[in-house]
Amino acid sequence: MKNTRSPGASSERETALPELWKLHQADASNQDVRQLLVDSYYNLGVRDLQRSDAKGAIAQFAEALKIDPSDAPSQRYQRFALAYKDREKDLLYRIYVKYLPSR
């Protein structure tokens, strides 16, 4: 997966997820596939935060954390999304999520 952002990158991740799950089910010990799954859900969560969809982000980070409960950035950004789930997305929110790194 590329680390650069492009207009189609998000849909590529969504398209790749079913294939990654097939690979993961075939060999659950494959750490590369596991990390790609975590990174894909993380990136989708960041995308949802940047689209002001905190509820969607919570779900994406939860998926990442099901695979790797120790993923600190997913934990942090899920807590952030939970804090804004039912709140107006203020200036602080918009500035913070604008610069979130993707993987």
Image: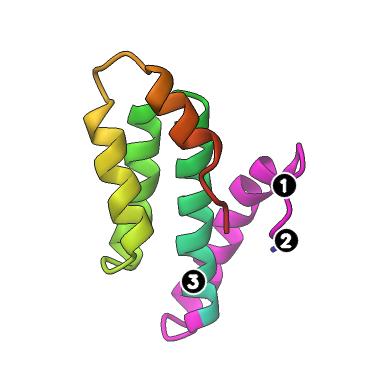
Dominant secondary structure of the residues highlighted in magenta in the image: helix
The amino acid type, in three-letter code, at marker 2 is Lys
Residue 62, position as x, y percentages in the image: 30, 49
The amino acid type, in three-letter code, at marker 3 is Gln
3 up-or-down from 82: above or below: below
Question: What residue did someone put label 3 on?
Answer: 35
Residue 5, label in figure: 1
Q: Residue at x 31, y 35 (%)?
A: 81
Q: Residue at x 33, y 29 (%)?
A: 55
The amino acid type, in three-letter code, at marker 1 is Arg
Q: Nearer the viewer, residue 22 or 87?
A: 87
Q: Nearer the viewer, residue 8 or 4?
A: 4
Quadrant showing the N terminus: bottom right
The extreme top residue here reads: 88
Q: Determine crowd level at label 2: few under 14, some 14-19, many 20+ residues with C-alpha closer than 10 A.
A: few
Is residue 10 highlighted in magenta? yes
Query: Can the viewer see residue 71?
Result: yes
Question: What residue did someone put label 2 on?
Answer: 2
61 up-or-down from 89: above or below: below
Q: Secondary structure at mark 1?
A: loop
**Earlier residue among tags 3 and 2:** 2
Q: Secondary structure at mark 3?
A: helix
**How did the renderer colour the structure?**
rainbow
Q: How many marks?
A: 3
Q: Residue at x 75, y 40 (%)?
A: 8
9 lies left or right of 85: right
Is residue 7 highlighted in magenta? yes
Quote the CA–CA distance across marks 2 and 1. Answer: 8 Å
Quarter of the view holding residue 60: top left
Quarter of the view holding residue 83: top left
